[in-house]
Image (spheres, grey):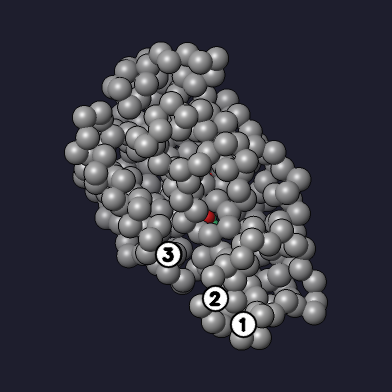
Amino acid sequence: MTGAGISAESGLATFRGAGGLWDGQPVERVATPEGFAADPALVWRFYSERRAQAAAALPNRAHRALAELEARLGERFLLATQNVDGLHQRAGSQRVVEMHGSLWRTRCSVCPAPPVEDRGLVEPPLPRCARCGGLLRPAIVWFGELLDAADTRRIERFIVSSARGASRLVFLAVGTSGNVWPAAGYVSLARSAGADTWLVNLDSAENVGAFDHFVQGPAGEVLAPLLRVENGDRGDDPARGGDGARGDAGPDGPPRERGEVTPGEGRASYP
Ligand code: APR
């Protein structure tokens, strides 16, 4: 499970905290259906800027580390991301669930026409749906909107079925503050399925108490060594229950006490 923090070292702003996308930017105006209805040009300006920034960015060592881990684990690996920047796929990841949609897709705000690939920087006159004439919008899951049920089902099925598998399930969250549901709740679902749970993050997170291990630091520096994916070292593989990386359980020492939090329903929400 990844969040905006994994793309920070690629030069893309995170959302919360100083200098974040939401710092001084009223979320309601650019990331809700109501905000789009009120001022679609403002919303398109915001997402066009994000498209331009993401197009200019490059995947970093942390993105590549996860792509390498996928190459090693194959179907025993699934990457659920809250990110819409497409950097995981550009790093070579294929088994990716984009829970919050993608910057690179556009869809109709009125009819159920399927989303289309779109890399354009949008300016007025705003684009309209060829099918119904409705305004087109970024295919992003905004606050208050439902995630695609196929995506949440795929994540939940992977967690539950993996728990029945021969090798131990590892749940790894990277670069996320644990503020947004349902993403913030999957660690507890994985935990209740017997997973060993890890958080790699620059700062502590809202749901840090739900993790067995917290490795604090920049993902680009700590993730590859933790996963032992650089230089083809097959060393200790978390999925095979190795323990090399266990010692690095962050500055606060041994695994934390278990905290019980339950996943919310499939609607993107924030405190
Ligand atoms: N390496 C690891 N973690 C980092 C790094 C880094 N280089 N830089 C920042 N972080 C951490 C921060 O400490 C923070 O906890 O990444 C986290 C980013 O948190 P948010 O900005 O809240 O982003 P995210 O958790 O992805 O937000 C979830 O909220 O706004 C919505 O839809 C949006 O998908 C997004 C969702």
Asked whether mark 1 and ligand 1 are closer than 8 Å, the reply comes as no
Disc tally is 3
Q: Position of residue 96 (x, y in %)?
A: 48, 46
Asked if the residues shown at circle 3 and circle 1 are in contact, with their CB atoms under 8 angstroms apart, the answer is: no
Rendered residue at 67%/46% (across/down)? 12
Q: Position of residue 18 (x, y in %)?
A: 64, 50
Q: Which residue is mark 2?
A: 113
- Of residues 118 and 126, the one nearer the viewer is 118
Element type at marker 3? loop
Q: Which residue is mark 3?
A: 148
Question: Residue 131, which numbered label?
Answer: 1
Q: Position of residue 160 (x, y in %)?
A: 24, 46
Asked if the residues shown at circle 2 and circle 1 are in contact, with their CB atoms under 8 angstroms apart, the answer is: yes
Rendered residue at 52%/33% (across/down)? 67
Q: Can residue 251 be seen?
A: no
Pick whichever of labels 3 and 2 is earlier in the sequence: 2
Real-space Cα distance between discs 3 and 1? 22 Å
- Of residues 157 and 204, the one nearer the viewer is 157
Of circles 3 and 2, the one toward us is 2
Residue type at mark 3?
Asp
Element type at marker 1? loop
